[in-house]
Every structure is written in C-alpha cells, then in structure tokens.
Image (spheres, rainbow, N blue to C red):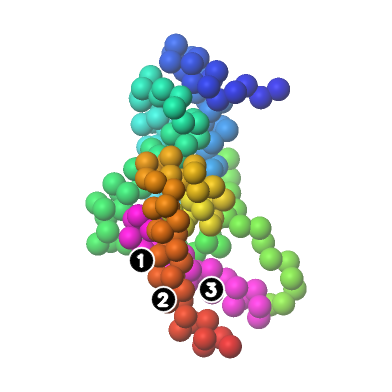
Amino acid sequence: MEVADLLLVERCKQDDTDAYEVLVDRYRNKILNYVARFSGAADAEDLTQEVFIKAYLAIRKFQGKSSFQTWLYRIANNVCVDRYRRSSRDRIAYSLDDPVETEDGEVAREIPDWSGDPEGVAQSRELQALVQQTLLTLSDKLRSVVILHDLEGMPYDEIAETLQIPVGTVKSRLFNARMELRNKLRPYVEGQG
C-alpha cells in the first residue's frame, strides 16, 4: 500500500529522511523528464538534484494548500527558469530521442517507434529533434505551459496552481505557445509534404 504524500511530508517535517527518500523515488522520473524537456538533457540530472535539495530545505514551509506534486513542479519550474535565464546565451538543443542518464541507468524520454519503416522513423526523429530545438526558443512562460500540458499531461487547473497564474492565462499561453511552435515548424512540415 502506498503511503500518501501528505503523510510522508509530515514525517519529513519531523526529520524522517526515509520518508523523503520515498518522495524522491516517487517523483524523480517525473521531475527529471520535466527538467530535461525544459532545459535540454545536458544538466537535467544536476537540475533535478537541485530541485529535490530545495524541496528538502523548504519542506517545513509546505502548507498543503496544493498537492505535494504541484508544489514540487513549482520548485522545478523556478529552478529551470533561474538556470535558463543565467545561461540563455549558451543554449544547446538536445534531441528528445536521447535518453537521460541516471544513477540507475538510462531513462527513455519516449516509447520507441517499432513501425518498421526506416524512412518514417528517421523523419520522425528529425522532427522530434526540431521540435525540441524549437521548444527551447520559446519564452520561459510559454515553454513551461506547453511542457506541463502537452508533454507531462498536467490539467489546466494544476498548471495554474503550479505556476501561480489564472487558468485563463494558462489557456492563453498554451494557445500562444502552440501558434508560435506551429509558425516556426511550418517550413519544415510544408517541406515534407
């Protein structure tokens, strides 16, 4: 039986490191995937570790007004935005096909395409790399919303809570991000047809 997040948080507030380890195990891959998509794979491990360190240091401030997952994603978003702003001049794009290295081995970012069509697979990988590269050109505000909704599958209300913005703003940013991605990717897509 899985122990509820709020119970684990309460145990963490009483310096129970085993409880925090359970939370890290529970959310590590989700945060790692979010961070890797936001910043590229180069420093995803470091940023993920920074997220969990910040969460551990701030766990006593967690009041339970949102879910622990929402609170953790908010920390992850802030860490990514801070790092992105510090290093915006040295941006590097990474393919979504590249696995993320972890202590336990590699974590795939996608389910492999076993369609058997080598040309289609090559075009799909090329498009995924282009999408990742284009995603990194979006502003922090637009990129975080499109990653949380379209790649992480988070609902509007949870994104609003995570980013501390109204649901209408989430929808507006998502629309604007998709339009910007569509416009930037249009030459590639039209060139394929």
Camera-nearest residue between 50 and 76:
76
Identify which residue is drawn at 33% across, 60% down.
139
Q: Are marks 1 and 2 in contact (CB under 8 Å)?
A: yes
Region rendered in magenta: 119-144
Residue 133 appears in the figure: no
Judge depth for marks 3 and 2 and give the one in front.
2
Query: Label 1 is placed on what type of residue?
Result: Thr
Residue 165 coordinates in the image, percent (x, y): 37, 45
Dot 3 alpha-carbon crowd within 10 angstroms: few under 14, some 14 to 19, many 20 or more? some
Q: What element carries label 3?
A: helix
Dot 2 alpha-carbon crowd within 10 angstroms: few under 14, some 14 to 19, many 20 or more? some
Query: Which quarter of the rendering shows the C terminus?
Result: bottom right
Query: Relative to 48, is 136 above or below?
Result: below
Q: Distance between the residues labelled 1 and 2?
A: 10 Å
> Which of marks 3 and 1 precedes in the sequence?
3
Residue 127 is labelled as: 3
Tag 2 residue: 184
